[in-house]
Amino acid sequence: MQRRTLFQMAAGAAAAPANTARLARHRNLFTGDSCVYFYNPELWQPEGLPYTAKAIHRYVDLLADSGVDTFLSNPNAQVAWYPSKKLDTILDGYKRGDRDFFRAHARAALVPAAQLDTYLDDMVRFHNLYLDLVEANVDWLAETVKACRRRKIAPWVSVRMNDTHGVEDADSHFNCKVFKDPANRLSGRALDPNDPPNPHWVALNYARQPVRDFMFAHIREYIETYGFEGMELDFLRDPHILEPGATDADCRMVTAFLREIRKYTEGHGRIPLGLRIPANLGYLRSRGLDVKAVVREGLVDFIGFSNFWQTSWDLPYEQLRAELGNDVVFYGVVENAPNWVPAQTPADMPAPAAGRAPYPNLGVRYMAASAPMLRANAAGKLAMGVHGIEQFNFFCTDQPKVPGLRADYSALRGIHHLASLRGKEKHYCLSSPSGRLSMLWEIPEQIPAVLEPKQRREFRLSMCKEPAGAKFTAQVIVEKSVTPARLSVSQNGAWPVFAVRETQAMLYPVGPYKQFPDNYTAWEFTLDAAAIREGWNSFTVTNQNKASGGTVKIVSFELGVA
């Protein structure tokens, strides 16, 4: 008898999702954005410039050698980042070495005056790589499709439906002509009605026909000119579709737009069509995207649920399945930050080269540099029954060029097979508040948590079962205080564990990062690996302090399997 997944049990269905067979070969997905080849030319063309098609083929070769079966290329923000013959492109009006071309975008990005010259020089170097290819008559998007087919990777496209890079200044070269007409923009209305509009939320307004026509033009070009074999509509970046408080009629309009896209793709070989969205269906409905109606009508084959930049550890997949039914495939999306809990920067970290800006996001534990984190995040999702794993922002680990921080592409091999993950090192975490605007449409975070004396807090996340003999460790990371923490941890309701040791070390290093900052301390407990459940697991942390002043602030809760 075939084992039923948690999805199927939650939905009360005996069969796998209807589109599983069609998507059977698409299990290990990798998304590369419009700059994926260009962030780190020193890696993909170490012999030097001018840039050539070799870099593209080397990158796709690396994906194929790492077990990726489907490459989703994201070629657009608002404008096309590829040499489109029909649409606005990122290079329109740019001449090699023209620093002034980027000043409007520097204003949009709020670049400090002290860093402006460095920023403009970097933008010139970056865009010159694209110009190298154009001048050599190389279309990098077409070359991507060619490289994928050569290596037998399925070439799919990921379409950003409302990217907001540059919207703070309408003159930014990131913005299309449609956006430059104020009538086609959303108001940027803030969450708090007492606050002024948020300039980063002034996105394209899908209530306007010119906006829908513009995005449809992108979609047609990807299919008719480039021949992509699958398409993801990325509404996560960003889910500003209509003004907040969309009516039923507004939602029907957006559904009709997706119906047109579905009809179009069915006329071109009925390629797989899906969505990348946050798991907050209520928020999406309030902005015009009625996911239930879209799925009920059969307009998409798959959905990838995700947070933005910070990966998810506790998405309620069984609830989403119950709400959406069993006719759509779910992918688990692995993002590139486990959470925003920082690591201690090593004292021997080399300074940036003379004249260069500081390393961006120093101390952020980029997951692509940690095979244990990647495995844990994928395993938790697979244990909940997702069809496969989609990597997102993986390559951004290399982008800041922090010494010792490198993306581990070899960790992608087999990451979509739960059986291959069991018994391997894993590092589970929980999401934390980002301070980013995306927190509005993401699942609320479980950390931080403040525990008064004798109070407790349950933390819940999905894991996979492990073979006998595995070592299982929990870390409760807290802010240091005058009164030392006295904690216990209960696993899945069992008798609590009190035996503990104090440490600054993380469970596993992430590139150059090995310790938490000095203002944090980690209390480490040994738990029972045999008691790990397939799917949801709960861990109750109790503050055993009795005295007044013994409050504990938990900044992270992390689990290690070895």
Image: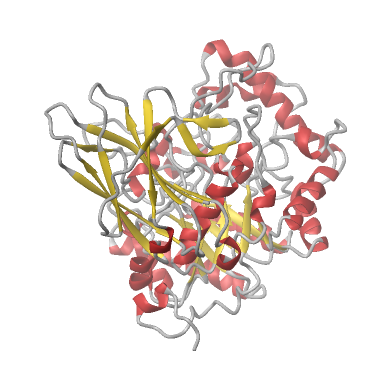
Snapshot quadrant of residue 252:
bottom left
Q: Is residue 436 above or below residue 415?
A: above
**Residue 452 picture location, percent across and down:** 16, 36
**Residue 486 picture location, percent across and down:** 25, 36
**Residue 170 picture location, percent across and down:** 51, 31
Q: Is residue 54 above or below residue 354?
A: below
From the viewer's perspective, is 468 left or right of 524?
A: right
Tell me if I can see residue 72 in this picture: no
In the image shown, does 356 or 449 lie closer to the viewer? 449
From the viewer's perspective, is 156 left or right of 474?
A: right
Task: Give the residue at the far bottom of this rendering.
Answer: 1
Q: Count numbered badges in the picture.
A: 0
Q: Is residue 229 above or below residue 98?
A: below
**Residue 351 picture location, percent across and down:** 63, 16
Residue at 65%, 24% (x, y): give it: 101
In the image shown, does 28 or 543 lie closer to the viewer? 543
Residue at 48%, 70% (x, y): give it: 259
